[in-house]
Amino acid sequence: MKSPSARYLTGYVFRAIFGTLLVLGAISAGRIIYPEHLPHTQADESSPWEKSLIYPDRLVNFLLTKYATNLNVNADTNIALLPDTHPATPHSTKILPDTRLSSIATSVARAKEEHTPPDTRPPTHNMPNMPTLPSAASSNTRLASVTTSAARAKEEPVPPDTGEWGVTIAPKAPIYGTNGKLLGRVPAGSLLKVIRHKKTTSGDLVVCTIMLNGRKQAEAFIRLKDTTLHGGSLSATTSEERTLCIRHARLLADITAREKQLKDSAAGRNPHMKEYAKAAREYKQLATKANTLRKAYNSASGPRRMEIADELRNLKHDEVRISQAYKTAKKQKTAWQIEHPATEPDLDGDSQLQRLRQEVAAVEQKLTAL
């Protein structure tokens, strides 16, 4: 436990230090804030008096700068009253009247003028004029624009697909892939979505999306003559409309199949047709293989070129046999057709065709009424 004398001396020293700091701070604040009311002489800046005010000046400048910042003064427009980022020099304590609190007040006023536009609205008697808040106004405008767009999107329906859709009308319509190979056949009444049309030397094609053997073909080719097309979107049609279109397509396919049956019956059975079909198939395969080997021979060299030449020579022997068989079968088929001319089938008098045509007309009438 310290003696009363020691406690008295300790308190006296602390009070003296605190009082000295308080006095120096007051002097610094007074000569910074009110430089015009305090006498200022060109004293030696290296004197002990001026040196003793360096840190109080820095402290007062720091507090004033914080005060100015709290008044929404932009950091870029603040003016440092005294440099505090460099070591103390004889010139660091020089006090300039134009860098005092008046500079901060001017900066605050200028910042307010730049960030707050003048209120041009006429005064009302019900409530006082309120300053315009640009940030809040712009935020409300953006929010209102987003809300309006969202509401408009809900009110306006999504525009329908402007493409085409169709139904197959051939009894077994062939479906081809993008590489030209046959993928399979679909029954009459198969629905399809048209992607685009394509013209070829062998006829007009439709690029479409269609179901084949339970699997969706995203992009397939079908002959235009094997379909009947409709404008608009398939998803926009009703169940009744699709059912009638499918029924209509299947009836057309039945008519095509019946007409072919009557024509074949009227033409009679050619006993040489089966042999001719086999010879024609072999002759076509031979021609395809020969063309492939010739292309490979022209682009090959060395031992591979000699191997292809041997294959072509062997193929030459098969060509004589296959060509002769094809010519013979074709001659026999043609001769029989000349001896047994085909008669025109009675397509108008066939009762089955008449019934099918009546059903087609009834379905077409229902589709027109929709």
Image (spheres, rainbow, N blue to C red):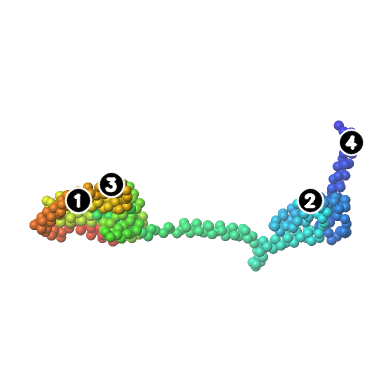
**Could you tell me how many numbered marks the image carries?**
4
The residue tagged 4 is 6
Place of residue 121 in the rendered image (x, y in percent of width and height, measured from the top left): 64, 66
The residue tagged 2 is 87
Q: Residue furthest top?
A: 1
Label 1: element kind: helix
| Residue 362, placed above or below residue 309 | below
Of badges 2 and 3, nearer the viewer stands 3
The CA distance from mark 3 to mark 4 is 121 Å
The residue tagged 3 is 307
Of badges 2 and 1, nearer the viewer stands 1
Q: Which amino acid does label 2 sit on?
A: Pro
Earlier in the chain: of badge 2 and badge 3, it is: 2
Of badges 1 and 4, nearer the viewer stands 1
Earlier in the chain: of badge 2 and badge 4, it is: 4
Label 4: element kind: helix
The CA distance from mark 1 to mark 4 is 132 Å
Identified at 67% across, 65% down, the residue is 118
The CA distance from mark 2 to mark 3 is 94 Å
